[in-house]
Structures are given as structure tokens and as C-alpha cells.
């Protein structure tokens, strides 16, 4: 009895795998949205057509998100003059926490607020953080789930590729 | 426990492990952050004062490995009711070292560790292994653990005395996010001990055959095996303001006939971005071991004899309060986050069938007042994340 | 021993249920909705080694042992 339960469980496990990759290449139009930004004005994704956009979803309560932000800031200053920008969507319910973090760890790229998760839902965000690389035609080309030290090298590779297109 | 059962369990464990490691790439967990955890702990009550430091240092190596080392000391000053009844107050020190490695592999966290605990008459070594995996969009976490311990029991004043006791722990836990504001968990643990499980100093008493108003002592005699099972349920809920309530129930049962219930309720209240206050209440009750008695009728009346109050029928109540100060993104060089906690617990134990033979007054054996005591436990901890 | 057989079977059943990607049920708490769960106020063991010390205090005075742990919840990041 025990042995057959074990075999069944094993068969079930092997049959029902659905891996969620850490990074994948895709080719899907990036859905448009408009969100309030930290500088006060509303920013719309479509307005950045012609630029390479790194869309990043982050929160102050997410450790890996906080970890990658200074590295993203470096990429921003390096490539922004080549037609590249970062749009960092903050999903904190309460933006005070985000501000408190940004006071201590300042970044230069635009911060957008999505407290009702409308854009997170639109993009079906499945991990925190999530980064989407969007090319100059508004097509989402690369998707990253999570952050581990070393991912910033992949980001840079992809930015250089998309900037040259 | 039969050797074949053990082997079967270990085999299943390895199958489970292999399937998790090589069969699935779930969205993952993160390793614990680099930190230094310094604690001062103090237990004061029932005639005993035990205090000391605990220092833990944790450091990540690369992005997949985190190692930790801990040093812990118990400085004991003991004049408890057991000590006063049959011996004299003593002082001693217990030192404990733990080393651990956590490995993030294909999105599972494997942990391996070793602990050594030494005092003048007891040495305990433990190896533990555990696996933790997040599933279902990070909503579920399964943890499996195994620990194996080897103890050497000595006796002060008798250098040739040396006995052994072995322990095995098997743990299984499931934690599930239910809503964005609530979390439930269930934990299951089986512990088996084998060997010299009694205390070489402790005595139990029987009525003096020559004088019914007096009693005599004899050494305790425990079974050589013990298997226990524990199952606990817990739930946390985030309130409409920045606070949480927590409830926990644990049922315990073992082959010595002891059944125990533990209930705990806790409340945590966020005052502002830095300060949090918390409080909790805990109630514990257990029934006595089959071979326990406060007073045996005559010498050697049973195969196994115990008068250890820890095996008696007892109930315990704890009231606890605490304050935590947290500083995120500190201005201190190299420190990302600082957390200071001060926690004070008041514990009260009431024994239903363990009597205080040191109580002043003339009592017939078996009619001394039931024993009870209370204690204060203080913990002051500083955690620095770097 | 019965307890251990139950433990083995439960472990495997939990694993097969939890790992199964064939399930039509999708996680209903999204990763970006973990604000409150990630709050330290919802942490089961926020005090570091101070928490495991308390288990040791009780184990030294009570017969019950085990099932004291508790993990999970939190931000579920990565």
C-alpha cells in the first residue's frame, strides 16, 4: 500500500511539471498604460515609443528589488543618452514607505506609482521583482523574474542589443 | 523504532528530495540576509538563574550560499527544589557552538548544520538537515527536516561513568498564504530517543518501611526508548491597521504516556515606522508519565521509576510583553538595518502531583504542599544587517 | 512505526499536490499583493535567535517538544 502511494505520487510529480523560468525571450506587444510619476506628472508608456524601455516592478518591502536598484541606476546613467529609459513601477500600497527608501537610496530614473495594482495585473506580474525589456517599437522582448546578483549583466547585454536596433 | 522503518523513511526522504531538486523549478525563496545577531538571555526563577550571551554571525558567499556560526553560553546558578532536596547549590556553564550552511539550489533551500553542546557532565552533538521549498506562486512553503543527535552522559565525581543517548527528529511543515492578510501553518514532528535517558543525579522517593512518617530516596530508572509525536497548527492575521494577531495550538503525545496541549495567542502592534509593541499569552498542560509518582509505596515498586517534575502532571501559564525598535537603511556605515528587541516573559508553573519536600513545616510524606514556582525570562537582542 | 509512515505518506502527498502544475487553480494572492504579509508585524520569528532560545526554555521544563517551527509567508520574492 505504501509503495504504490509512493509510485503514484512520483508519477504525478513527474507528469505535472510546469517550470517558471528565471528569464525568457518573448515577442509580444507591451500593453500601454498611464501612471502618476514621482515628479508629479502622468507618464504614458506609448510616449516612450522610439526609446528602449526597461519596465521594472518593485516594492519597498521586497529585498531583491532594493538590491538591484543602485545597479539599475548605473545602467540608467550609462545608456540614457542612447535612447534608453527605465520606468520603475512601485507597487507599495502606501507610497510613504517607497519614499523613505528612496531618500536613503536615491535613484535618477522615473518612479511610477501603481498602488491599485492595475498595471501589475495588466502585465500579469508573477514574481517580485519583474523586469520587462521593451524595444523601440513597443514590443516586449525579454522578461526577467526575480533578481539574483549577476542578473544586471544580462540586463546590460539586452539593453545594448536593443539600443542598437 | 525498527531499523527497516527508519531506512524506508530515509529512502522516501531522498526520493522526495531528488524529485524536488531535479524535477521542478519553482519561483523561489531568498537566502537569509547577512547579519550579526547578539542576544543576552536570562532565566530567573524556581531557585535558578541562568543567563548568558548568544552571538551569531551570518555571511553570504556568492549568491547561492550563506554560512553561519553561533556561540551560546548558559551560566547556571542552581538552587532549584530538586537540587535543594537532594544535593547542594551549584554553578556551572554550558557552551554551545553551531555551524550552518544554507544553499540555494535550483530554487530550493537546503540547510545543513552541526551543533556541539558541552558542560562538565554532558556533551551533545547534533547534525541537522532541512529542505525548504516555495510553491504555488510563493503561497505555499513546504519544509522537511531531519536531525540526529549523539549525547554522552557523565557524572560529576565519577570519572568512569559514561552513558550514551541518541536522538532522531523528523519534521514536516506546510505554510500557506490564505489571503493577502492571513497565513496558516501546520507542523508535524516525530522525535525518537534511545539510550540512557534518565538523569544520573536525580532521585525519587518511597515511604520508609521502618517509619511511615519518613521517606527514603532511590535513583530514578527510565525506559531506554522514547518516541514522541507533535502536531501544531498556527494562524496569523493582519488587522485593518498595522498590527497582527496570532494563534497557535500544539498537541503532544509520547510513548511514556504523556499528553500535552499548548495554546498561545499573540498580538503585535506597529506604533510607527520604528517602534513595535507586542504581547502574548500561553497556556500549557500535560499529563504525567506512566511511571511517574511523587511518592512510591516501597523500594523498587515498579520497573521504571521517575519523580522528575518535568514528567509530572502540570500546567503552565506565560504572559509576555516586548518592544522592538527597527531602523531601516541606517546612516551607520556598513549597516543596512538595525533591530533592537527587549522581551520579557513571566512564566508560572503549577504541579498537580509533585510536592515540595523542602517546604517548612511538619508534613507526612505525600501531604506536603504541591509545588509551584514562577520565573522571569528576559531577552535583549540586537540584530545588525550588513 | 505508524507515525513515521504517516509522515512519509503525508510528505509525498503534500509534495505532489503542491508541485503539480496540472492544477487549474492559480495563486490568488499575487506577488505584488504581499505588502502586508511582508511586514515584520506578520513574521513568525522576527527576533532571530531570541525566538529559538524561548523554545529551549520550555523544552527544559516541559515534556513536550517538537513542532515549534514556522516559516513561510513573508514577501515571497524571487
Image: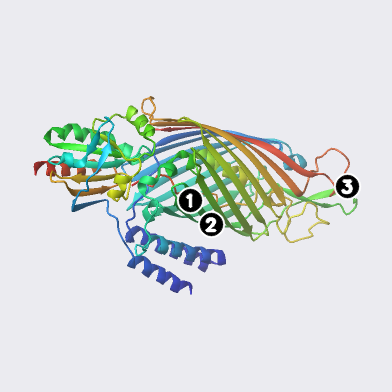
Left or right, A67 with reference to A141: right
Residue A151 in picture, x, y percent from top left: 24, 43
Give me the chain letter of mark 1. Answer: B
Q: Residue at x 22, y 39 (%)?
A: A44
Report which quarter residue A148 is drawn in.
top left
Within 10 angstroms of label 1, few (less than 14), some, or many (20 or more) residues?
some
Out of A108 and B384, give the one closest to the viewer.
Answer: A108
As drawn, the label of residue B127 is 1
Residue B248 in picture, x, y percent from top left: 57, 49
Q: Which residue is mark 2?
A: B188
Report which quarter residue B100 is drawn in.
top left
Within 10 angstroms of label 2, few (less than 14), some, or many (20 or more) residues?
many
Among numbered discs 1 and 3, the one appearing first in the sequence: 1
Q: Judging from the image, what secondary structure is the residue with disc 3 in?
A: loop
Q: Which residue is mark 3?
A: B364
Residue C25 in picture, x, y percent from top left: 38, 61
Find the distance from the CA under tag 1 to the CA under tag 3. 48 Å
Give me the chain letter of mark 3. Answer: B
Out of A48 and B109, give the one closest to the viewer.
Answer: A48
Q: Is residue B34 above or below residue C9?
A: above
Q: Judging from the image, what secondary structure is the residue with disc 1 in?
A: strand
Can residue C58 be seen in this snapshot?
yes
Q: Residue at x 72, y 40 (%)?
A: B373
The quadrant of the rendering that contains the C terminus of chain B is top left
Find the distance from the CA under tag 3 to the CA under tag 2. 44 Å
Q: Are marks 2 and 1 in contact (CB under 8 Å)?
A: no
Out of C5 and A48, give the one closest to the viewer.
Answer: A48
Q: Is residue B257 above or below residue B138?
A: below
Amino acid at each position: 500500500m505504501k509503495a504504490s502511494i509512493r509510485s503514484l505520487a512520483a508519477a504525478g510529480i513527474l507528469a505535472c511539471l510546469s517550470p517558471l523560468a528565471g528569464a525568457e525571450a518573448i515577442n509580444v506587444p507591451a500593453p500601454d498604460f498611464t501612471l502618476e510619476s514621482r515628479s508629479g506628472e502622468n507618464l504614458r508608456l506609448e510616449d516612450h515609443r522610439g526609446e528602449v524601455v526597461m519596465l521594472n516592478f518593485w516594492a519597498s518591502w521586497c529585498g531583491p528589488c532594493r538590491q538591484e536598484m543602485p545597479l539599475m541606476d548605473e545602467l540608467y546613467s550609462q545608456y540614457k543618452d542612447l535612447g534608453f529609459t527605465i520606468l520603475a513601477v512601485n507597487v507599495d500600497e502606501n507610497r510613504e514607505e517607497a519614499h523613505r527608501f528612496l531618500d536613503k537610496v536615491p535613484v535618477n530614473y522615473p518612479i511610477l506609482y501603481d498602488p491599485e495594482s492595475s498595471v501589475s495585473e495588466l502585465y500579469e506580474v508573477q514574481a517580485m521583482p519583474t523586469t520587462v525589456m521593451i524595444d523601440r517599437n513597443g514590443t516586449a522582448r525579454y522578461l526577467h523574474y526575480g533578481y539574483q546578483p549577476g542578473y544586471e549583466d544580462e540586463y546590460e547585454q539586452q539593453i545594448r542589443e536593443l539600443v542598437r536596433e | 523504532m525498527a531499523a527497516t522503518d527508519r531506512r524506508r523513511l530515509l529512502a522516501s526522504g531522498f526520493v522526495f528530495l531528488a524529485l524536488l531538486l531535479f524535477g521542478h523549478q519553482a519561483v523561489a525563496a531568498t537566502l537569509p540576509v547577512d547579519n550579526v545577531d547578539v542576544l543576552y538571555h536570562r532565566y530567573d526563577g524556581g531557585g535558578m538563574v541562568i543567563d548568558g550571551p548568544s552571538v551569531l554571525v551570518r555571511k553570504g558567499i556568492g549568491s547561492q550560499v550563506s554560512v553561519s556560526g553561533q556561540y551560546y553560553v548558559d551560566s547556571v546558578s542552581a538552587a532549584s527544589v530538586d537540587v535543594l532536596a537532594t544535593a547542594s547549590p551549584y554553578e556551572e556553564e554550558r557552551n554551545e557552538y553551531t555551524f550552518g550552511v544554507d544553499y540555494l539550489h535550483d530554487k530550493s533551500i537546503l540547510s545543513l548544520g552541526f551543533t556541539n553542546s558541552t558542560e562538565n557532565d554532558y556533551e551533545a552533538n547534533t547534525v541537522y538537515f532541512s529542505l525548504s521549498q516555495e510553491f504555488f506562486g510563493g503561497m505555499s512553503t513546504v519544509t522537511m527536516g531531519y536531525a540526529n543527535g549523539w549525547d554522552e552522559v557523565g557524572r560529576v565525581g565519577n570519572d568512569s561513568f559514561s552513558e550514551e543517548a541518541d536522538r532522531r527528529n523528523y519534521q514536516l511543515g506546510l505554510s500557506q498564504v490564505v489571503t493577502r492578510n492571513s497565513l496558516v501553518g501546520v507542523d508535524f514532528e516525530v522525535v525518537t530517543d534511545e539510550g540512557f535517558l534518565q538523569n544520573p543525579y536525580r532521585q525519587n522517593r518511597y515511604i520508609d518501611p521502618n517509619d511511615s512518617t519518613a521517606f527514603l530516596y532511590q535513583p530514578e530508572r527510565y525506559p531506554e526508548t522514547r518516541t514522541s509525536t507533535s502536531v501544531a497548527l498556527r494562524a496569523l492575521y493582519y488587522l485593518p491597521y498595522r498590527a497582527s494577531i496570532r494563534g497557535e495550538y500544539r498537541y503532544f503525545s509520547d510513548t511514556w504516556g504523556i499528553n500535552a496541549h499548548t495554546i498561545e495567542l499573540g498580538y503585535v502592534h506597529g506604533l510607527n515606522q520604528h517602534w513595535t509593541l507586542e504581547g502574548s499569552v500561553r497556556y500549557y498542560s500535560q499529563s504525567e508519565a506512566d511511571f511517574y509518582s511523587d511518592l512510591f509505596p516501597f523500594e523498587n515498586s515498579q520497573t521504571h521509576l521517575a519523580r522528575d517534575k518535568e514528567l509530572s502532571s502540570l500546567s503552565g501559564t506565560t504572559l509576555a510583553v516586548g518592544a522592538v525598535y527597527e531602523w531601516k537603511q541606517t546612516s551607520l556605515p556598513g549597516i543596512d538595518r538595525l533591530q533592537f528587541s527587549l522581551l520579557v516573559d513571566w512564566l508560572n508553573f503549577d504541579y498537580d502531583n509533585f510536592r515540595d519536600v523542602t517546604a517548612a513545616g511538619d508534613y507526612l510524606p505525600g501531604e506536603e504542599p504541591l509545588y509551584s514556582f514562577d520565573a522571569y525570562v528576559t531577552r535583549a537582542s540586537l540584530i545588525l544587517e550588513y | 512505526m505508524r507515525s513515521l509512515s504517516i509522515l512519509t505518506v503525508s510528505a509525498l502527498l503534500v509534495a505532489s499536490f503542491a508541485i503539480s502544475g496540472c492544477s487549474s487553480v492559480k495563486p490568488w494572492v499575487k506577488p505584488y499583493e504581499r505588502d502586508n504579509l511582508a511586514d515584520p508585524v506578520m513574521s513568525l520569528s522576527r527576533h532571530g535567535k531570541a525566538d529559538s532560545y524561548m523554545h529551549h526554555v520550555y523544552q527544559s521544563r516541559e515534556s513536550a517538544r517538537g513542532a515549534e517551527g514556522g516559516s513561510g509567508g513573508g514577501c515571497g520574492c524571487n
